[in-house]
Image (cartoon, grey):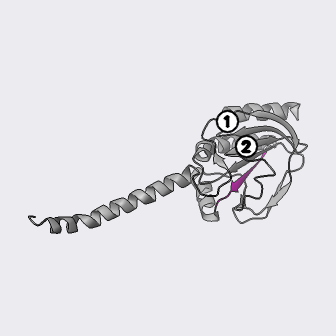
């Protein structure tokens, strides 16, 4: 090709496609790490440290993400893990396999798990549940109605609630499976 204009015309569609792919990839990355505009919750992209609490858990009832009956919290008489997550939250993906593993092991001991998909759309939330094979119930809170009630400032946030409906431990950031098991063993052992 000796004609520079013909050369530019031949490369222009390739450059446009490459630029478009770059923009879309950057947007998906920003959503995955929590960079959505207007989101009152930051992404807690670090390992969580459990902090002891002793506060009554706020009650709520939200629609099920899976389309079943509404999910009421707290379940009376059960130690419960309450995990706030979003498909847009990268650290939520880090902790999801460990949460599922703990759920499978501890449900036989009467522990309940409830996930709450915060500030998300239904399709993205259901895709996240499928991707990580989560079998515990998840509610949906697309408007973030629980952000203030639970003082959510970083995602993910996980609470351990005792049999009397008292918030006993709070984890902000991705919770390690071993840390959650330790706190559950303490709570089941009569701490709450």
Q: Which residues are magenta?
A: 112-120
Q: Can you identify the residue that label 1 sits on?
A: 48
Q: Can you identify the residue that label 2 sits on?
A: 158
Residue 168 occupies quadrant: top right
Lateral position of residue 22 relative to residue 155, left or right: left
Q: Secondary structure at mark 2?
A: strand
Local crowd at mark 1 within 10 Å, few (<14), some, or many (≥20)? some
The x and y percentages for residue 66 are 69, 62
Using the image, determine if residue 102 lies above or below residue 12: above
Residue 62 occupies quadrant: bottom right
The x and y percentages for residue 69 are 78, 64
Please report the residue visible at 72 percent of the width from the left and 38 percent of the height from the top: 171
Please report the residue visible at 65 percent of the width from the left and 51 percent of the height from the top: 134
Lateral position of residue 102 relative to residue 124, left or right: right
Q: Secondary structure at mark 1?
A: loop
Viewer-nearest residue: 46 or 107 = 46
């Amino acid at each position: 090709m000796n004609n520079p204009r013909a050369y530019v015309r031949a490369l222009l569609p390739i450059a446009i496609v490459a630029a478009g792919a770059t923009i879309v990839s950057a947007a998906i990355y920003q959503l995955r790490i929590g960079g959505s505009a207007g989101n009152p919750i930051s992404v807690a992209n670090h390992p969580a440290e459990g902090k002891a609490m002793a506060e009554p858990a706020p009650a709520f009832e939200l629609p099920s993400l899976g389309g079943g009956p509404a999910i009421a919290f707290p379940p009376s008489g059960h130690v419960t893990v309450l995990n706030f997550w979003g498909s847009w939250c990268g650290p939520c993906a880090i902790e999801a396999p460990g949460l599922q593993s703990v759920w499978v092991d501890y449900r036989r001991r009467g522990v309940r798990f409830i996930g709450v998909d915060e500030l998300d759309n239904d399709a993205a939330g259901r895709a996240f549940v499928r991707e990580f094979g989560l079998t515990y119930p998840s509610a949906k809170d697309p408007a973030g109605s629980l952000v203030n009630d639970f003082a959510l400032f970083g995602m993910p946030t996980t609470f351990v609630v005792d049999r009397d409906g008292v918030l006993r431990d709070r984890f902000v950031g991705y919770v390690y499976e071993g840390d959650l098991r330790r706190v559950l063993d303490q709570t089941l052992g009569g701490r709450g």
